[in-house]
Amino acid sequence: MKGSRALSATAVSIAVLLCGAASSQAVVATVPPAPAPAPAPAPAPAPAPSVAPGKISLVVEHAYGNPPFVIAGGRVVVRGIVVPYVGGQTVKVSFYRDGRKVDVQTVSVLAVGNGAGQFHLNYSSASAGVVQARAAHYATPQQGAFSARSTSVSFVSANLGPGAQGPSVRLLQSELNALHYVVPLDGVFDEATGRAVIAYRKVTGLERVASTNAHVFELLQRGAGSFHVRYPQDGRHVEADLTKQVLAEIEPGGHVRAIYTMSSGKPSTPTVIGHFNVYSKTPGENSEGMVDSNYFIRGYAIHGYHEVPTYAASHGCLRVPIPDASAIFGWVQLGTAVDVYNETGGGSERVSGNAGP
């Protein structure tokens, strides 16, 4: 009996151990595994550096006239204004003559205050032609790309005369036309261009020849050579300056319409000075060789003639070149006022009874 109880106790102990083990396994089986740690977030990318936008303007200096020009062999200054200014930037400037690239320069942009930068460079051409500067700033990490073009500048040949042709002649004609000299605009230095040059030289006090030089173009650059209207109150009228030996058609308000070379009366047969009105008009050529005549008092007339020297040489009339006579005849009307005057002497206040061509 005693041995049986000991065996039973041993059995019980074993059973308890087995139950405990099973219970422990059951607990382990029901506990979920621990979650895996979340991955660390990727670092945010560094912000990209800001790129400044930009714009540029180009100004050409030391070129004058309309359009601007400079005598071949001279130089211009190209100035660029860059906004905004960003340190360390450069600009490439290319020069084109008649559409063909002839020079390239790279220049640094320097600060000038107020958030702007600038650069400047010189350009000279010994050859005639139309020149334009083109500037380009290529994109950098600090500033975007931008570009600009300058106005065109003509480099002109200054020594022009009969038979010359090309852009320099065309520019000469354009400048004379802007001042109201009667001149073609075809780029050919013909007789009509020569007459306009002579009229311009008369007004500016130069030697009266049908050719140009550097001084003529320098005067044109400055806008010299305009006709000074003496009697703007006379409305639509003609003015004949005996000192300068030019004739001008004047519109109401004192606006110059056209300027012509002329030849007035020589000292022995001077042109009468004063205020007159056209009283008779005779088209065509008369027996004395006067073409398209506009009489303003007795035998004194504005008319075309085969000989019109650069000085006073008529018998009292106001001679104009025959190619100009028709246009003048068409503009002058019966009653049109004619003002004849001198600045430094010449002419007469006495009306001659035998004035002629």
Image (cartoon, grey):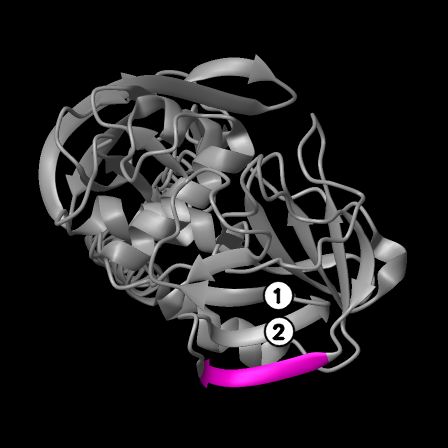
In front of the other: 298 or 35: 298
Tell me the quadrant of the picture where the N terminus can be found.
bottom left
Residue shown at the point (55%, 74%) measured from the top left: 293
- Residue 214: horizontal and vertical position, in percent? 31, 23
In front of the other: 143 or 109: 109
- Residue 75: horizontal and vertical position, in percent? 29, 20
Dots 1, 2 in contact, CB < 8 A = yes
**Dividing the picture into quarters, in which one does residue 90 lie?**
top left
For badge 2, the amino acid type reads Asn
The segment highlighted magenta reads 280-284
- The label number, if any, that marks residue 28 in the structure image: none
- Residue 318: horizontal and vertical position, in percent? 57, 56
Against 310, is 292 above or below?
A: below
318 to the left or right of 108: right
Against 6, is 112 above or below?
A: above
Q: Which residue is outermost to the right?
A: 233
Against 272, is 344 above or below?
A: above
- The label number, if any, that marks residue 301 in the structure image: 1
Q: Which residue is outermost to the bottom?
A: 283
In front of the other: 71 or 40: 71
- The label number, if any, that marks residue 294 in the structure image: 2
Dot 2 crowding, Cα within 10 Å, few <14, some 14–19, many 20+: many
Q: Is 347 contained in the magenta span?
A: no
Marks 1 and 2, how far apart in space? 5 Å
- Residue 212: horizontal and vertical position, in percent? 29, 33
Against 78, is 148 above or below?
A: below
Can see residue 184?
A: yes
Residue shown at the point (58%, 34%) measured from the top left: 267
